[in-house]
């Protein structure tokens, strides 16, 4: 079963050359070398990979877990269902 966190780890490993094992939910993005521009780039990638639309409202995401929660909420709102960190995203 692939979760939102798993898919985000794959994206970060691929695009930012990060070790997926180092991506705990409380890991600060800044500590991974991902600044606000990097977060914006990540969200554009997430939009494509998850086939969702990002909010036009600015959002402050400072940890990996906050990104996971934000994506889960957008997926749930846009697909009308219960996407959560532990829920499979295989049908996405």
Image (tube, rainbow, N blue to C red):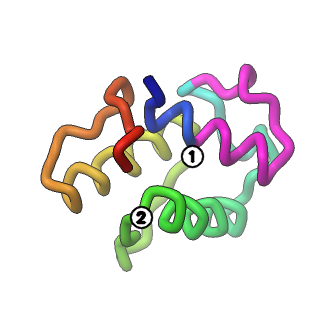
Q: Which mark is residue 88?
A: none
Q: Residue at x 67, y 39 (%)?
A: 10
Few, some or many C-alpha atoms within 10 Å of disc 2 (few <14, some 14-19, many ≥20)? few
**Drawn side of residue 48 relative to residue 70, left or right:** right
Q: Residue at x 38, y 50 (%)?
A: 92
Q: Residue 76: percent from the left, percent from the top?
A: 22, 49
Tag 2's secondary structure?
A: loop
Q: Is 39 situated above or below 56? A: above
| Residue positioned most to the bottom | 56
Q: Residue 88: percent from the left, percent from the top?
A: 36, 31
Q: Which mark is residue 51?
A: 2
3 within the magenta span = no
Q: Name the N-terminal-most of marks 1 and 2.
A: 2
Q: Which mark is residue 62?
A: 1
Judged by its main secondary structure, the magenta piece is helix
Q: Residue at x 53, y 59 (%)?
A: 49
Question: How many dots with numbers?
Answer: 2
Residue at mark 1 to residue at mark 2: CA–CA distance: 23 Å
**Drawn side of residue 60 relative to residue 36, left or right:** left
Q: Front-most of 68 and 92?
A: 92
Q: Residue 5: percent from the left, percent from the top?
A: 51, 33
Range covered by the magenta-colored residues: 8-24
Q: Front-most of 67 and 13?
A: 13
Few, some or many C-alpha atoms within 10 Å of disc 1 (few <14, some 14-19, many ≥20)? some
Q: Nearer the viewer, mark 1 or mark 2?
A: 2
């Amino acid at each position: 079963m692939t979760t939102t966190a798993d898919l985000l780890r794959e994206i970060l490993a691929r695009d930012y050359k990060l070790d997926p094992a180092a991506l705990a939910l409380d890991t600060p993005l800044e500590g991974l070398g991902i600044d606000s521009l990097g977060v914006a780039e990540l969200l554009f990638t997430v939009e494509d990979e998850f086939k969702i639309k990002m909010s036009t409202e600015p959002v402050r995401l400072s940890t990996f877990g906050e990104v996971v929660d934000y994506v889960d909420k957008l997926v749930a709102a846009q697909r009308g269902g219960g996407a959560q960190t532990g829920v499979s995203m295989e049908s996405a």
